[in-house]
């Protein structure tokens, strides 16, 4: 029988079923233990230090107690602390990105995804390099600077060579003032050597959703194809980091398995990466199962309410305070508005989940991976964020200045990251306003920038940022960064 060991490289030891079940039992027994809950909340609070805020974070067991707690005033306190932590380390910045689907050819049999190989009626597509270029130009014309590329697992149609060629096409396509400055990659688990090749291609974050940490459910949900191998999939992040990729992104698909089990497993994975590699996940995504071509989410009986979803997100923020939390257009404007105040730091905008969707004027549905709930334009999303007090950030400076992995985390944990992220966000927002925004969005944006510039504590940094913003507004100079 596998024994729990966060430093082990074996999936069933660092994601240990017995440990998760014991954790859930412990959490249930203590869900009304006010003294314990208060001590956990106190541990989670951000504390002001000499150079900024610090946070201890929470263990998977401590965070599971908070998730199990049903005391209304304690839940509200969880939400308040989540917002405090987010503001302490990320300020009111929200990083913007868009997914780009390259191919929906797939050899796996995942029962929750319409790309599964048994689906014979879905339109199968794979972008040519010229089509990739057109997609990139369409995304640049919206104002995007950061992409997350997606592709099904198919060694014949989507070999790594194809992914690398697409990455090169994306980075070398420039249109007017547009440029994609960071390409994150969400593709199937692969070898250390292939991760090295992705690193050499200049990727940002390697993202791989676990889908479910419950091994028995995992095997049933992935009945055929290479993804059926639970250990190989679960151990992928260790191979990625061995291959030199500093930033990795975790996530589960909530709705496939009982959410408390998934929550504990997700945090155990984060603890494992910290224990083995000295740095936890760069991001954690919180997608929920959605309707798709031949997928009915109602056939899965583990769906979660908006209230539970909000509680999960807030508890993740308390547990892993320095990690970015991503919420996509799977969720509605109403849900996204709520979660922005509970620790979310990245959102997608104007997303299309079909292969080749951006170059088309009308949103295509024949090759979509899932229904998009928030179908607003990027301009509308940017204005919505600003009207709610957030700074939409198109910044990619940390990645391009080598502030990744443990270097990013050390800066974040010391509070020093705020000295460059805040002005960088304002400068990239200015680029967006000048080059792409509607007049209404410009009006809101310039007012916000004027107010936010006053908050930069360093007079030197503030003066440089103000001058750079003037240069962006009055010339074609772009890409200033601290």
Image (cartoon, grey):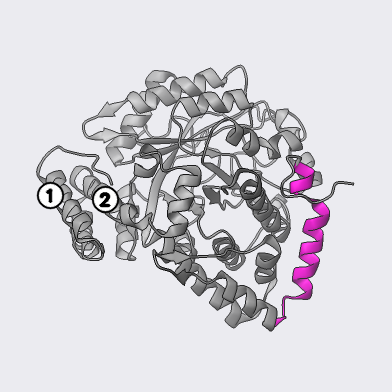
Q: Quadrant of residue 361?
A: top left
Q: Quadrant of residue 43?
A: bottom right
| Prevailing secondary structure of the magenta residues | helix
Tell me where the magenta segment starts and ends, as one range: 11-33
Q: Is residue 28 above or below residue 89?
A: below
Q: Secondary structure at mark 2?
A: helix
Q: Nearer the viewer, residue 238 or 431?
A: 238
Location of mark 2 (residue): 429
Location of mark 1 (residue): 470
Residue 476 percent across, percent down from the top left: 14, 37
Q: Nearer the viewer, residue 468 or 219?
A: 468
Q: Is residue 153 left or right of residue 83?
A: right
Residue 366: assigned label: none
Q: Is residue 397 left or right of residue 264?
A: left
Tell me whether circle 1 and circle 2 mark residues in contact (CB < 8 Å).
no
Residue at 58% x, 82% y: name it: 73
Residue at 67% x, 74% y: name it: 69
- Total labels drawn: 2
Residue at 58% x, 63% y: name it: 57
Residue 322 percent across, percent down from the top left: 50, 56
Residue 13 percent across, percent down from the top left: 78, 46
Q: Is residue 202 above or below residue 308?
A: above
- Residue 319 can be seen, yes or no: yes
Residue 218 percent across, percent down from the top left: 75, 43
Which tag is nearer the camera, tag 1 or tag 2? Answer: 1
């Amino acid at each position: 029988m596998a024994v729990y060991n966060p430093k082990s490289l074996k999936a069933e030891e660092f994601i240990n079923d017995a440990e998760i079940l014991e954790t859930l039992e412990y959490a249930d027994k203590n869900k009304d233990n006010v003294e314990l809950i208060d001590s956990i909340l106190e541990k989670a609070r951000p504390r002001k230090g000499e150079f900024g805020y610090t946070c201890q974070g929470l263990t998977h067991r401590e965070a599971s107690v908070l998730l199990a707690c049903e005391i209304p005033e304690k839940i509200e306190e969880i939400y308040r602390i989540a917002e405090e932590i987010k503001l302490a380390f990320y300020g009111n910045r929200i990083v913007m990105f868009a997914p780009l689907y390259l191919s929906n050819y797939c050899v796996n049999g995942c029962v929750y995804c319409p790309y599964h190989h048994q689906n014979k009626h879905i339109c199968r597509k794979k972008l040519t390099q010229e089509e990739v270029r057109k997609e990139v130009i369409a995304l640049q014309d919206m104002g995007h600077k950061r992409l997350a590329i997606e592709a099904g697992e198919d060694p014949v149609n989507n070999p790594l060579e194809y992914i690398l060629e697409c990455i090169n096409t994306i980075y070398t396509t420039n249109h007017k003032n547009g440029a994609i400055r960071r390409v994150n990659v969400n593709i199937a688990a692969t070898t250390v050597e292939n991760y090295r090749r992705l690193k050499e291609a200049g990727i940002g974050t390697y993202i791989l959703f676990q889908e479910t940490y419950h091994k028995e459910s995992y095997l049933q949900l992935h009945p055929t194809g290479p993804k059926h191998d639970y250990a190989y999939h679960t151990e992928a992040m260790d191979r990625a980091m061995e291959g030199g990729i500093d930033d990795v992104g975790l996530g589960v698909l909530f709705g496939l398995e009982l959410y408390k089990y998934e929550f504990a497993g997700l945090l155990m994975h984060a603890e494992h990466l910290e224990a083995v590699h000295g740095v936890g996940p760069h991001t954690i995504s919180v997608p929920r199962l959605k309707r798709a071509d031949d997928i009915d989410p109602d056939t899965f009986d583990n769906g979660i309410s908006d209230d539970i979803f909000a509680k999960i997100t807030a508890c993740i923020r308390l547990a892993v305070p320095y990690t970015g939390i991503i919420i996509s257009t799977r969720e509605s404007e109403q849900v996204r508005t709520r979660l922005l105040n509970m620790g979310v730091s990245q959102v997608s905008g104007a997303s299309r989940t079909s292969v080749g969707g951006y170059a088309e004027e009308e949103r295509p549905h024949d090759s979509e991976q899932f229904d998009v709930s928030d179908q607003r334009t990027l301009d509308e999303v940017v204005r919505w964020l600003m009207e709610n007090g957030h700074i939409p950030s198109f910044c990619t400076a940390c990645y391009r200045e080598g502030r990744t992995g443990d270097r990013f985390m050390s800066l974040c944990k010391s509070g020093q990251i705020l000295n460059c992220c805040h002005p960088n966000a304002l400068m990239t927002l200015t680029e967006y306003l000048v080059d792409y925004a509607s007049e209404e969005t410009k009006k809101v944006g310039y007012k916000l920038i004027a107010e936010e510039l006053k908050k930069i504590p360093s007079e030197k940094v503030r003066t440089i940022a103000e001058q750079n913003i003037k240069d962006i507004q009055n010339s074609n100079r772009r890409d200033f960064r601290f």
